[in-house]
Amino acid sequence: MTCGLPRPVSRCPRYANAWHPERVFAPFEYAYPLDHYLQALKFGHGRMLGRALALLVGRSLEPALATGALAADTLVPVPLHRERLLQRGYNQAVEIARTLAAELGMRLELAAATRVRQAAAQSRLGARARRANVAHAFRVRGNLEGRRLAIVDDVITTGATMNALAAALLQAGAERVEAIAVARTVPQ
């Protein structure tokens, strides 16, 4: 098993703690100019960018679907806490997941999980604090016995959010959980 980062790193963050997603698909590096589009999607009322970014990701995932490397059949967007959703007006992960599900011919499960704890903004925290910030932040609705799911988000930084949600989905019976994001940050 390899780290999955696009260039060699001295220590893979995947091995620092228990890692729950089976695979991570984040085809782009969080860098210029994509970082500006993702910031606009998340904070600049750029809701329509979700569709465009999902189309880019969808095209890059086609080979993984064709070979079976991406084994999920249902997409689960990372939920926002109710208060953050009211502030922003939409969930950027849902905006990406809607188009991605249509492009890839997958089911979309909007109500599989909820965020039950309002967390501090992850962007202001280090890796250890990010893990603590999202620990037990998600509640899964219903039995997911035997389901093959892929979590969808905009950016993976430390993976703490994806990992916490994947743990909750697996605990609710999911057979397999993968992670999909538009981009990931790459340690320098």
Image (spheres, rainbow, N blue to C red):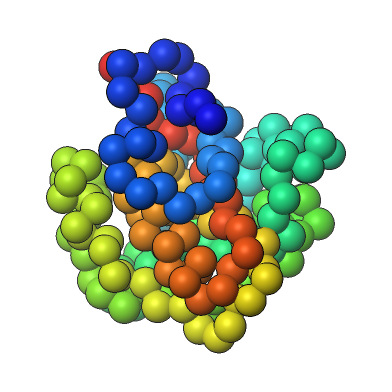
Name the residue located 67 percent from the left edge and 68 percent from the top edge.
Answer: 147
x, y percent for residue 21:
50, 50
Name the residue located 54 percent from the left edge and 41 percent from the top edge.
Answer: 24
**Quadrant of residue 76 in the image?**
bottom right
Instruction: From the viewer's side, name the closer residue of 181 and 34.
Output: 181
Name the residue located 40 percent from the left edge and 53 percent from the top edge.
Answer: 163
Q: How many marks?
A: 0
The answer to whether 85 appears left or right of 181 in the picture is left
Instruction: From the viewer's side, name the closer residue of 116 and 4.
Output: 4
Q: Is residue 56 above or below residue 115?
A: above
> Going by the picture, which residue comes out furthest to the bottom?
142
x, y percent for residue 140:
46, 78
x, y percent for residue 86:
34, 74
x, y percent for residue 157:
34, 39
Q: Is residue 125 above or below residue 82?
A: above
Q: Is residue 30 above or below residue 100?
A: above
Name the residue located 41 percent from the left edge and 22 percent from the top edge.
Answer: 32
Q: Quadrant of the C terminus?
A: top left
Instruction: From the viewer's side, name the closer residue of 58 and 90.
Output: 58
Residue 124 is at least partly visible in this image: no
Residue 12 is at least partly visible in this image: yes
